[in-house]
Amino acid sequence: MKAYLKNMLHENIVTIVFAVMCVLGFIASGQTLAYVFSEVVTRLFRNFGLVFSLIIPVIAGIGLNFGIVLGAMAAQAGIIFVTHWRFEGINAIIVATLISLPLSVLFGYLLGRLFNKTKGQEMITGMIVGFFANGLYQLFFLVLIGTLIPMKDDRIMIYTGIGIKDTLKLEDGVVNALDNIMKVRMDKIAVPAIILGIVFVLYSYWKHKKDPKRNRNNLYADISHLIGLVILLLLAAFNKDVIFAMKFTTVPIVPLILMIVSGLFITAILKTKLGQDFRAIGSNMDVAAASGINVNKTRIIAIILSTIISAWGQIVFLQNIGNFTTYSSHQKVGTFAVAAILVGGASTKKATIRQAIVGIILFHTLFVIAPLAGKALLNDAAYGEYFREAVSYGVITLSLVLHISSRKKGK
């Protein structure tokens, strides 16, 4: 047990530090739990797709895929065209998704081919490709639209008739098209969801207990998860502040369903032959190749899946926001998604759905409270903005340093 706790502390040091920072920032901000809780829940269902898109490349040994920026560009292209064609509501989301699909497959294929040429340097390659693709994206929407590609639309085009405006407002029917289909107060679903989680953990514990080859770490993990869920259940059932915060917060059911389906889809993929190939390549590329796995092809498939999920995640993100800056909304998608999953305890070699969700919650909790804490402590919210900007890059640096040091220690 002692060894398990020591190992868990070492693997989750970034998560623990962030959790402490969130608690201290919340106390300093002076904000109510209801406000922070509502904002974080909104951001969870807004950002899950972008963060989930990083999981498969990590497992496949490609690392943290900063190239998901290409998927975000494909999504924004779809949103621009449905805005021009005046699609509204769920139809706009469906058409934008269909437009982004072939673009995502193409971008993912090209990115995967490039990653195969730069094995071991995929993360920096993904960053540089993002900058290069951004130039092509601007060339297309700022120069070619209205010249080589005819388009006349005063609402979305620059007054000269060439190029798309810097800021686009989505059609009224498109804004929150998914969110507004159905909303439920969180206090109505929180307790049943936690109880379901407790049942699942108990089943997992029983399954590991009966396994003759059981790993004690799995049992300890189940026990720690069970303790955490019981604490959450007690807070949700008896703490007045938490109960009020849940009554104040509404959950968009469709994004919730999409998040669950996305998690199940990734889990199902990883249990297939393709998923086993991902794991084999991530464990040892040379051994995987020797066992007959087509390493390059499998890596390309991983990047295509990642790009598709990121594109659809960006569509969910934009419909929640309601507007976006045409030429910059996608630029920090990769950085913020990578920072979030690292905060959840992931590394360049390991990532799970749980780590992605925990990371989104902690990272965006700090995003919400940092300006408020800066204003309360220093009478200037800008300090909080600078702080969270530095943190988003600092957590990436810290996580990579810890990963490299632990890998050297292992060798």
Image (spheres, rainbow, N blue to C red):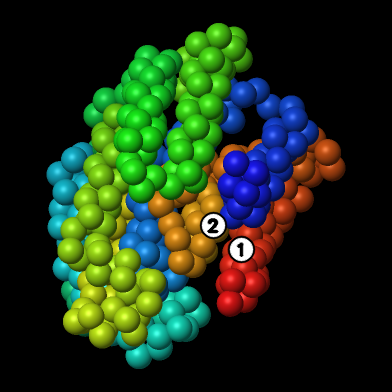
Q: Quadrant of the C terminus?
A: bottom right
Q: How many marks?
A: 2
Question: Quick one: 330 or 281, which is closer to the camera?
Answer: 281
Mark 2: give few (<14), some (14-19) or many (20+) Cα within 10 Å: many
Q: Is residue 86 left or right of residue 68?
A: left
Q: Where is residue 384 in the image (x, y as percent from the top left)?
A: 72, 48
Q: In this view, does 86 lie to the left or right of 27?
A: left
Q: Residue flagged by tag 1: what amino acid is it?
A: Ser
Q: Residue flagged by tag 2: what amino acid is it?
A: Leu
Q: Residue furthest bottom?
A: 117
Residue bearing mark 2: 342
Query: Is 81 located above or below residue 247 in the figure?
Result: below
| Residue 170 seen by the camera | no
| Residue 392 seen by the camera | yes
Query: Is 95 located above or below residue 121 in the figure?
Result: above
- Per the image, label 1 sits on a secondary structure element best described as helix
| Residue at 46 percent of width and 66 percent of height | 349
Mark 2 in CB contact with mark 1 (< 8 angstroms): yes
Residue bearing mark 1: 399
